[in-house]
Image (tube, grey):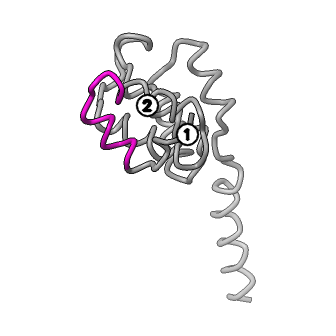
Amino acid sequence: MKAVALLSLTLALAAPMAVHAAPTLEDAIAEIEEFNDAAALVMVRELAERGDARAQELLGFMLLFAGTHYRTGLPADRGEGLAWLARAAAQGREPAGAMLRSLARSGDGDAQAALARADVGSRR
């Protein structure tokens, strides 16, 4: 009887956690379109940390261009933005690689280092 009660309690406590679905990149983009960049940033970061190359690319752009291309309230972190772009480029995301190459060609030493880490400098 105790085992049945314990199993029922365990299932009851686990049920709410199972209902929460992980965000998708489409969810994050919908938040951006609703001018809720802070919520989008949380979602994109979660996806990027799980290895989603598209999310890594978007997170890189969001951090790199916070305050210029995205609304206020996002923390600008150029170094972290370049690092996420490098991770995305290393997974084959061409827009991330193109941005790193462009910045590197303009003499940006941080972008040159990120490009070297991504090992995509010779592409295109």
Mark 1 Cα shell of 10 Å, populated few (<14), some (14-19), many (≥20): few
Q: Which residue is mark 1?
A: 123
User: Considering only order in the chain, which callout, 2 or 1, is on the residue closer to the N terminus?
Assistant: 2
Quadrant that contains the N terminus? bottom right
Horizontal relation, residue 95 to residue 111: left or right:
right
Which residue is at 57% across, 29% downward?
95
- Kindly report the secondary structure that dominates the magenta region of the rendered protein: helix
Q: Is residue 110 magenta?
A: yes
Q: Which residue is mark 2?
A: 101
Dot 1 and dot 2 residues touching (CB under 8 Å): yes
- Secondary structure under badge 2? helix
Q: Bounds of the magenta span? A: 104-116
- Secondary structure under badge 1? loop
Quadrant that contains the C terminus? top right
Q: Nearer the viewer, residue 7 or 98?
A: 98
Q: CA distance from mark 1 to mark 2?
A: 9 Å
